[in-house]
Image (cartoon, helix red, strand yellow):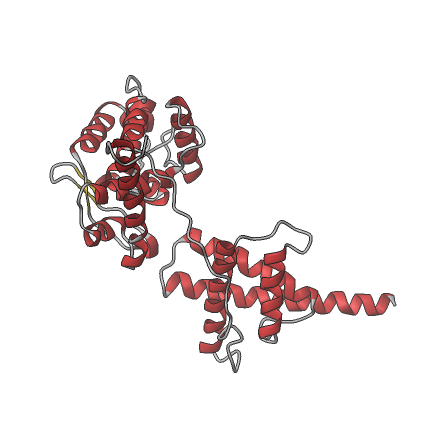
Amino acid sequence: MAVTLEKGEARASAVEARFEALVLDFLAHLEFERGLARNTLGAYRTDLLQYGAFLARRHRGATEADRADIADFLADLATGNGQPACSPATINRKTACLRSFYRHLRREDLIDADPTAALSPPSKSRKLPRVLTYAEVKRLLESVGDGDPIGLRDRALLEVMYGCGLRASEAVGLEVNEVDLRRGFVRPHGKGNKERMVPLGREAAAAVTRYLRAGRGELVGSRHESRLFVNFRGGALTRQGLYKIIRRRARAAGLDGKMSPHTLRHSFATHLLSGGCDLRSVQEMLGHADVATTQLYTHLSGERIKEVYFKSHPRAVIK
């Protein structure tokens, strides 16, 4: 019995090692040939290793798995199988990851047929993201004092994120030479390391100017740092550091629990559309590859218009 168990464990270990080698090759393809961002690669790796552990329990390799194995894996995610069940959105993401992985294996002639070809993921009900009103944005920005380098940095950071609709990764990755204060543009690098140009409004430009003149130099000191936004030691600000700043500033403005870094990006897009900006321009500024992604914000702005209507029109509600 002990010998049988040892053989089973050795086979499972060999299956997992082979699977990890396939995953590493796939991730290298995504990074070097498709230019995917590091955070996306990390998410793909996590999803695939979870799938690999599921297969290992069945003593199945990735190239041996069939449609039934993958369907069982997704069913486990949906039911939880003793763990918290995944949402339809999460299952859709993992399904997309598996499809991409198996398409890669098929291109490399490692499998004869793609077992994900006929998969039907659960329908995804799109949840509208949280958006701040303009009054809330104003309260947030004006709650940040600029009497010290940290205050100057935080005000500039929030102004740029809201004023340019940047993702968290784009804000922390922004370099000093990618901000053109004279012409009023920033050049963030989005998903797939694609660069775009986004207008920099007067309030944001003024906040960045104050930060560069009286805040950043004190934080950086004698260090050589190319990133625009730095931490209190003068090094590049991280995503984790950015989240902490957002939480702290939201709490101070009475918006605790109501926002994340992405909330400012959602608010940027919604406020532009509500103000009459065309969808194509908003798509360009957000860096969306597909205009369908940007169309989500037309629903948001429509809801905002309806909300304002029912609050304002004298005959909108029967009294």
Q: Is residue 20 left or right of residue 263?
A: right
Residue under the image location 66 percent in, 71 percent down:
60
Coordinates of residue 89 in the picture (x, y in percent) = 48, 55
Q: Is residue 203 left or right of residue 125?
A: left
Residue under the image location 20 percent in, 54 percent down:
280
Q: Which residue is the extreme one toward the top?
A: 147
Q: Which residue is the extreme one toward the front?
A: 319
Q: Quadrant of the N terminus?
A: bottom right
Residue nearest the viewer, comparing 302 with 40:
302
Q: Quadrant of the C terminus?
A: top left
Number of numbered discs overlaid on the protein picture: 0
Coordinates of residue 317 in the picture (x, y in percent) = 31, 35
Residue nearest the viewer, comparing 263 with 49:
263
Q: Is residue 98 above or below residue 109?
A: above
Q: Is residue 240 above or below residue 29?
A: above
Residue nearest the viewer, comparing 76 with 166:
76
Coordinates of residue 206 in the picture (x, y in percent) = 18, 29
Q: Which residue is the extreme one toward the bottom?
A: 112
> Quarter-wise, where is residue 232 in the image?
top left
Q: Is residue 17 left or right of residue 213?
A: right
Q: Which residue is the extreme one toward the left?
A: 183
Residue under the image location 36 percent in, 44 percent down:
169
> Quarter-wise, where is residue 239 in the image?
top left
Coordinates of residue 192 in the picture (x, y in percent) = 34, 57
- On the question of residue 252 being in view, the answer is yes
> Quarter-wise, where is residue 205 in the image?
top left
- On the question of residue 228 being in view, the answer is no
Q: Is residue 231 above or below residue 26?
A: above
